[in-house]
Amino acid sequence: MTETADLFHDDPADEGPRWPEVRAWLQSHAATLVEDRALLQELGLRPHGPNVVDFGAAALSRVEAVAAREAGARKAIEGVARANFAAQAQTHVAVLDLMEARNPSDLARRLDAAAQARFGLAGASIVLEKPGGIPFGWRALDPGGVDGLLGRNGLHRLGTGGQGLGLFGAAEDEVRSVALVRMAPHVGPNGTTRPALCAFGSPDPEGFTPEMGCELAAFLTRVIERMAERWPILS
């Protein structure tokens, strides 16, 4: 393997030219460098009259490259900011619509409609563990089902999957990624809590990923949790 010569390393044992020698040779043979257009192009330089080399092109290209990188990064940040602002605005409108729900079934219907119309999802559902009654339009899980999906202490889960869970009804075949958020509404007898979750399903495998934040989905879930407590489930 060959090694790149270090023109500045002062070691008497090394053979080969040193930078002072190379510099002196270039000074005395300037025409040789100026006339070697292929070498100048490789160095990003441009001849400009006798014994003059224009360094502007190389410097300008570096400045333009930096500016292009900065412009690309700025556009990416602006795009993310616009998407976040739009999602927040849609979330606020969805919350206002959820607050108009007249009963548990209407609440589930409004959540599913908002997920599809405002966020482009395949669907969304309210999921409640048994035993106990399950309102029409809600999805049922066997005892321990919420812990089975989120882990014993898990608050949410984002990622691919969603098919075969029985959480999205007729839309389940369209779901490729999910956001599941735990909740525990006081809807049992005497105001006791029941394990539950809100499920959001996206038709895009990258719609929900583990690296994403869960703030907006969690905010909607808290609204659903409080709204569900308007109508205790007695059976």
Image (cartoon, helix red, strand yellow):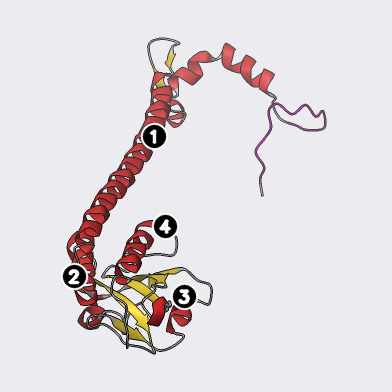
Type of residue at label 4?
Gly
Q: Nearer the viewer, residue 221 or 24?
A: 221
Label 2 or label 3, whichever comes before in sequence order: 2
Type of residue at label 3?
Leu
- How many C-alpha atoms fall within 10 Å of the one at disc 3: few (<14), some, or many (≥20)? some
- How many C-alpha atoms fall within 10 Å of the one at disc 2: few (<14), some, or many (≥20)? few
State the CA–CA distance, disc 1 to disc 3: 40 Å
| Residue 133 position within the rendered picture, expressed as x and y whole percent measured from the top left | 31, 87
Tag 1 near tag 2, CB within 8 Å: no
From which residue to which does the magenta span run? 2-15
Identify the residue shown where x is 49% and y is 20%.
Answer: 33
Instruction: Identify the image quadrant of the C terminus.
Output: bottom left
| Residue 179 position within the rendered picture, expressed as x and y whole percent measured from the top left | 36, 68
Q: Which residue is mark 4?
A: 213
- Is 29 magenta? The answer is no
State the CA–CA distance, disc 2 to disc 3: 30 Å
Label 4 or label 1, whichever comes before in sequence order: 1
| Residue 90 position within the rendered picture, expressed as x and y whole percent measured from the top left | 23, 54
* Badge nearest the viewer, 2 or 3: 2
Label 4 or label 2, whichever comes before in sequence order: 2
Label 1 or label 3, whichever comes before in sequence order: 1
| Residue 28 left/right relative to 218 | right
Q: Which residue is mark 3?
A: 150
Q: Which residue is mark 2?
A: 102
* Badge nearest the viewer, 4 or 1: 4
Give above or below for 15 relative to 215: above
